Amino acid sequence: MLAMNYRGPYRVRAAQKAEPEIEHPNDAIVRVTRSCICGSDLHLYHGLVPDTRVGMTFGHEFTGVVEEVGPSVQNLKKGDHVLVPFNIFCGSCFFCKKELYGNCHNTNSQATAVGAIYGYSHTAGGYDGGQAEYVRVPMADVGPTVIPQDMDVDDAVLLTDAFPTGYQAAEMGSIEQGDTVVVFGAGPVGLFAARSAWFFGAGRVIVVDHLEYRLEFAREFAHCEIVNFKDVRDMAMHLKKITDGLGPDVCIDAVGAEASGNAMQRLTGVVLPIQAGAATALHWAINSVRKGGNVSIVGVYGPTFNAVPIGNALNKGLTLRMNQASVKRHLPRLIEHIQAGHIKPSEIITHRIPMEEVADAYHLFSSKLDNCIKPVLIP
Ligand code: NAD
Ligand code: ZN
């Protein structure tokens, strides 16, 4: 089969690979119909995630048709069209019982804190991902959700990560009626965070980025105000000034590690070591939020940021209010929002790219070329 194949930092290609097989009675094999590239894949692509092995196939945001199920699988059958949450989880451990699916204890993730994730290095379990024609889905009775009959598959694929993650970012902000919410990052996650802030009663939503095309898109998609950080000398001062001198009630970091490093490099023209320009959005969030306000972090931080063990804190989901999203927990509510016409997630998809061109797709998304917001690979 044709699959995305990691060769090293900034080097990926489409290559032939053996089709996955049932390895455990709880497995299913899924023929992929849609597979997105995520900002989290860029951390792998940039070589920032430990134990990312040459030959691995990335991809944790996918939909597909069940081709085969292992003998113990009861809830899925051949022919079901499913969306598969990015977390691999057992559904029955201490953490899963608390619906902390991103922190499942029963997957063979090497990381002490985070559960396994499709196509996310051996640190997160070593499972091949869905940027391929076929993918093995472990614990197939718990993760996959059958796509509702009336749902567009392009909307469904955004329920595997970006939309629930943005939604959880807003939820973790503990937004109160009328609150002013600032979202750093106008990527897919930030867009859904901004949009979701209204569901929780925000009175004002402001999105910060430096890519004008994304900010313009955010203004329409999330009905928000926008701030281009290139125009702002002191972010905390600026946000205080436009919020009656107090600062926003809630700040959301939807940027994470090297995205901001890259942004600062582009801005200054200086190639910064990853640590240097790195946690800009997080600093801005903490420095800008009003006293007693809430900071919610979904941007991902890797080991290079462990001077403050922020990555570990995120993976463990400590009550600083940050976590990997628990996708499955949000699905019933988000499916309702889509079916009620409150939101059409697929509006953020800008590029549909055949699997053969996966290398171009990564380059496009990483370099934010051609007004790219969300690329979807079609096997
Ligand atoms: P993306 O790269 O498309 O978007 C990031 C955006 O942040 C870009 O538009 C960039 O220009 C902007 N940006 C960079 N520096 C900034 C700064 N200092 N202030 C404001 N904006 C800045 O990525 P995405 O797919 O939207 O993902 C965003 C982050 O969320 C990534 O770190 C990703 O790993 C993380 N993520 C986390 C989870 C989770 O479960 N916690 C799930 C999915 C993605
Ligand atoms: Zn993702």
Image (cartoon, grey):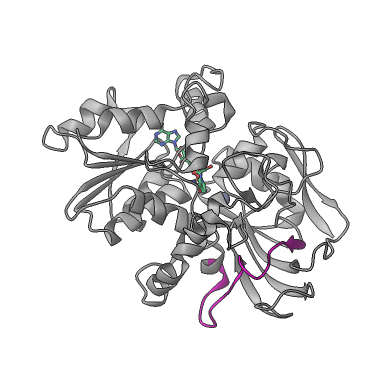
* Residue 241 in the image: above or below residue 354: above
* Residue 20 in the image: above or below residue 54: below
Q: How far from the left and from the top, in percent, is residue 349?
A: 52, 58
Q: How far from the left and from the top, in percent, is residue 301?
A: 52, 34
Q: What residue do we see at 52% from left, 41% from top? A: 315
Q: How far from the left and from the top, in percent, is residue 242?
A: 17, 36
**For the view shown, which residue lies furthest in the bottom direction?**
149
Quarter of the picture holding the N terminus: bottom right
Q: What residue do we see at 41% from left, 45% from top? A: 186
Q: Which quadrant holds residue 66?
A: bottom right
* Residue 28 in the image: above or below residue 370: below
Residue 217 visible in the snapshot: no
Residue range corresponding to the magenta coloring: 133-154
**For the view shown, which residue lies furthest in the left direction?**
244
Quarter of the picture holding the C terminus: bottom right
In front here: 91 or 188?
91
Q: What residue do we see at 80% from left, 38% from top? A: 54
Q: Is residue 146 magenta?
A: yes
In front here: 150 or 223?
150
Residue 247 visible in the snapshot: yes
| Left or right of residue 175: residue 315 | right
